[in-house]
Each structure stands twice: as C-alpha cells, then as structure tokens.
Image: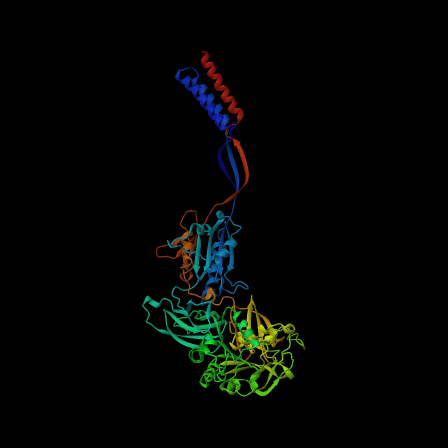
Amino acid sequence: MSGELTFVTAPLLPWPLIAALAAAAAIGVGVGWWARARGALWRTLAAVGLVFALVNPVTVIEERRPLTDVALVVVDESPSQGLGERRRRTEAGLQAVETRLAQYKDLEVRTIRAGAPRAGGGGGEGTRLFEAVERALADVPKSRVAGVILLTDGQVHDAPQPGPDGALGEAERERLPGPVHALLTGERSEGDRRLIVERSPTYGIVGKPFAVTLRIDDGPPPGGRDPARQLARVDVRRDGGEPQSFRIPVGESHNIEFTLEHGGTTIFEIAVEAGPRELTLDNNRAVVAVNGVRDRLRVLLVTGEPHPGERTWRNLLKSDPSVDLVHFTILRPPEAQDFTPVNELSLIAFPVRELFEIKLAEFDLVIFDRYRRRDVLAQTYLDNIVRYVRGGGALLVSVGPNFGSSGNLFGSPIGQIMPGVPTGTSFEQGFKPKPTDLGRRHPVTADLPGADAADPPWGRWFRHIDTEPRRGQVLMSGANDRPLLLLDRVGDGRVAQIMSDQIWLWARGYEGGGPQAELLRRIAHWLMKEPELEENDLRATVRGNRIEIERRSLVADGKSIEVTAPSGAKRTVALAEGRGGRSGATIEAEETGLYHLTDGTRIAIAAVGALNPVEFANVRATETLLAPAARATGGQVLWLADGLPDIRRVRPGREAGGREPGGRGWIGLRANGDYVVTGLMQLPLMPGAALFLLTLGALILAWRREGR
C-alpha cells in the first residue's frame, strides 16, 4: 500500500462567477494602486485572500495498491514440435524461463499449452497460437500485460502477416499484446523435402484428361550454393490401386495428367521419394480428391421396328437434360417391296457407317430395342459393337418376339457377348416381374419400391422370351420363373438383356404400373460403371470423427474388414449383416489422415480431417511468420539453440529486446506500474478560519491606513 499527494481545486462558486469577481476585485485594487491610495497593499492582500477562499485549493492524498503485471508463456504443442530435439528443447526452455520470471515479485506468470489438433478438427486449421493468446489474456487489461513469450518452432498459422508495405495493419496491431517474443526450438539450417500440390481441380469430366500441378521443394541447399537439377520419383495411387510412377524435376512446377474412369469421388494418393535431408516423411505425401461428373451422356438407341414401347424409351432418355440421345427407328426393312420412295419414308438416311464405325466409341451406351437382323447393319458393324463392348463400352438389349426366331440378334456376332441363349420359346401370358434371390442383393434391383414383398405390387407384363443363362447374373424372373433380366461383364465392358419388350406397360401405369424409370436408370448406371451400383463393393464414409463402413456383396460370407490407420496401426472390424446385400459397421477415427480399408479383395479409402493438413505442409523452423508481430510490438525472435536469452523488466516506451555487442540476445517485459485506488483523503490547503482571519485583518489594516 502506498500514498500519492496531489493538489486540486474545489471552487465554492462556478468558475465564470469567480472569474468575474476576481476581475472586479482586480479593477478596484488597480484603481487604488493607480491613485496611490493609502492601504492599497492591504486591500490587494484581502482581495487575493477572498479569491483564494472561493477557489478553495485542497490537498488530495490517494491510497494506492499496486497491481502485478501479467506475463504469458505459450508452449507450442503442435505435432511438428515432436520433430528432432524440439520437444526436449521446449521443456528445458520453459523450465528456465519460469525460473527466471519467478524472481520478479510484481509479475504474475501464466503458462498455457496450445497448438495441439482440436478434437474433430482434422488438423486442417494448423497451429493457432494467437487465438490461444487472446483467450488467455481476455480478462487482463492491456495496462497490466508485461509481454508474451512463445516457445515454438515458428510454424504458427494464425500469426498476423504484413500487407504490401511490409507493415501490419492498424487493427492487427491493436489486437496484439506487447511485446511479443518468440523463442524458436528448431535449427536454422534444417532441411526437409516436401511435396506441394500447387493446383488441382475439385471435379473433372469422366473420360477427359485433367492436370494436377506438383512441385517438390527441398529447401535452400546447404551453404547457399545453387543445387544441381535432379529428378525425383513420384508414385500415384488411384483409389488405393497399384501405384503409377513418374519422374519429375525437383524445385520446378510440373503437370501430371490423369483421366477419370467413373463418376463420383476418385482419390489420388501422391508420394515422392525421400530427399537428401528429411525431418519427416508426412509432407512427402499429398492427397487429391476429384469428383467425376459426366459432361453429357451420349446414348445410341436403335429400334428395330415401331412398337408401343418405342415412345417409352425415347421419353425416358429425353427427360434427362444431361443425355444426348441419337435415336433411329427402322421403318421399312430392305425386304419390304412396296415401291414407296425412300424420301417419303424418312427425313434422313440411316447413317450406318458414321454411327457404327466412325463415332461408335463416343457413345456411353448403345441400346438395341426389338432389333432384328435384316441386313440393315452389315456384319462388320456388328463386329465393331463387340469390340466396343470388350473395350469398355455398354450394351443394353431389349428383345421382342423375333428374338426367339431365325434372324434374331443372337445369331449375329453380338451373340458372343450375350449372357442368355434363346430357347425359341415365348410366353404370351400375364406375369409379374420379380427379383430373384440374387436380385434382392444386387444394387440394380435391391430396394426397388415393392421389391421386398412376396407378391410385388406391380402391374403385369404379357410377353416373355425364354432364355437359358450361360453367364452373368439373373436379377429378375418372369413367366414360369424364367430369367427376365440378365447382367454380365464382357472384357472391360458390360452387357444387359431384358427378355421382354413390355416394360412400357409400367410407364403407362397399367395395373398400377411399376418402378420402370428407376429400374432402367439403375441398369444404365451399372452398365456405365457408376460406383454406387457396384454389386461387390467396399465403401467408407466419414462423418465428423466417425467412419461408416458399408460392404456390398452378392454372397453373405461374413467377412471382416482390416482398417489401417494413418500411423500404420491395424485393426479388424466385424460387419453386421443388413438388407439388400449390405453389411456395415461404424468406428471412431482417433487419428487424422487417410484410413485404408480392405476385405482382402477390395480397397476403400477414408480421409479423416483435412486431406493435406496445414500442420505438416512445412515443418522447417522459421522466424519469418512471427517476425512481423514481434517488430510491431517491439519484441524479439531468437533461437534457443543459441542459448536462453536474458529476461529484463523495462519501462513502457523503452526498447523491449535486443542483442548486446558480442553477447546473447535479451528480451524485455514491460513494468507497467499499474495500480488501484483503495482510499482518498482531501485536506484544505489553508483552514477556512485562518483564511478568514487573515482576510479580515488585511481589511482592518487597510481601513486604519486610510483613516490616518
């Protein structure tokens, strides 16, 4: 507790009135002095006494209690602090700093640990030390802040950065407590190779190339000499598959082209081989997720003859704005001899060569609807379709009554790739299409509205062309439980057979209709290899810090999933069997990064948190990020490798750090001298009675002087 003496005034009248009375008194006294009247001196003393009494000067004595200053010590606990000697150096530096600060009795030391990844944050936010500083000093007025000492490697991602003029903005300077000092825990000459993804698209067009721009940064070479140009091997895995290797130059931006093979998300894991100097291999890897979309779906529909279902196909395909449909109907076969001119039958001639030779590969899906061989398509064009499918194309055949007779499409080269062989029998009777046991597990037919019922609430069809399956999968049955929908893989492509031409009855709503649009959509997407329609598939979906695992299989084999965490730790997860060929489980993700899941055959990847965490983008210790904040507050950025700096208390406005000539650096903490007033006492400068007697005496003496 201490006291402080000050002088103040407590006027008895308003200041303007006191000023007017003082002026009048001065005039009266001045006239007396000018006239050399007797007693002028005593009148002057009396006037001064009266004015002094009206001004009423008092002595104020404050009782003050000094407040301690607050020094904040921030310990960086981010993952990059675990490299090399940083953690040990940090703890040793913390102990030494706290020991030295303990000698100052007027200083409150607060130590906080910050920068560790937030729970569920994924590490994408990086090291946020200045946010922690604001929270820790939120209850401390700036007049009590002595300074901030950061024990860190310098990779602080919320540090304020200067503008184009090299200085911090006014708002950022106001937010900073001062002074801010940083004691760096790394080494000046650290080297580390890192892989930088400079540019990558968030989406790409399926089947079209796109580029990812990479750069390999080895940092400044030792000794500052120019490095020799060298190449490094980069391995790229697509969706966990086999790696593809490239050789790219170090220190230069380089484009690598990829082509998306399917819609949905494709994850590319990119890794560069270890460099000559490494702190960690975590930043030698990067992940790029590209969402595949189809620009336009090109469909070729060839209708062998006009029939009621032709309009259904056309309406379905034209209703989707993303579909480019090329539709041809063979109105008159070559054997028809009615002598009608061709130009009166069709607006354009059937461009056979252009469609089935030149541009066939441009189509995503080819559909034959009730097509019959009538020498419209030559044998060579049908061979082209077979090659198109084996090379990755998609073919859908919807058969009609002629499929079981001579001249059917099965007797052409296309018959080689069809999964069902016609028996020559047709069923002309009412029946309801039903999913088979396999169909209830296959994503094309599983979960169709009403499919789970023993008697689906769908309308009947009245024609079924019998076939004997020789390959592929039978997903739906029709009349007499014979195969109705067959799917098969042929080479790199896929084929589907619908053994009826009466799906249009569902579209017309006959007997309540059925899921015609959804069924055909799923068939088309399966043919085009959309991932969500894969019947044997493994998927992992990340929701917060949980990974939802879903496995689809046509056989309930009870397989478990092996999960490999980003750290390499492995665990086995049992799946619970569900509906529609699904089995699944949910696990907690305790680490951030890429999780690899496998059932022994298929692989799935789950990215928890940021794909490329900021924390490991660059792990070299640096003073660059913290230097602007230190300069703006008068602080210092020093290296603990040079030794612990001296710590001093300095007055506000004085230098808060520096380096002695030939010696170590030092850092200063402000001695603010803040206090709170606990008591207040006011004493008049002169007691009122004494002042009254002195004034009265001066007036009496002036009167007596005039009376002589």
Using residue 679 as the reference point, say whether residue 238 is left or right of it. Answer: left
Can residue 608 be seen here?
A: yes
Give how far across and how far down residue 442 sits, in percent: 59, 78
Give how far across and how far down residue 443 sits, in percent: 58, 76
Can residue 287 be seen here?
A: no
How many numbered circles are shown? Answer: 0
Give the residue displayed 40% in from the left and 61% down from the top. 642
Using residue 510 as the reference point, say whether residue 348 is left or right of it. Answer: left
Q: Residue furthest front?
A: 339
Using residue 680 as the reference point, say whether residue 179 is left or right of it. Answer: left
Give how far across and how far down residue 141 sits, in percent: 51, 48
Q: Return the residue nearer the eye: 222 or 644.
A: 222
Q: Where's the C terminus, which quadrant?
A: top left
Above or below, 166 relative to 437:
above
Q: Return the residue nearer the eye: 169 or 422.
A: 422
Above or below, 81 relative to 485:
above
Q: Residue furthest top?
A: 708
Q: Return the residue nearer the eye: 570 or 649.
A: 570
Q: Quadrant of residue 667?
A: bottom left
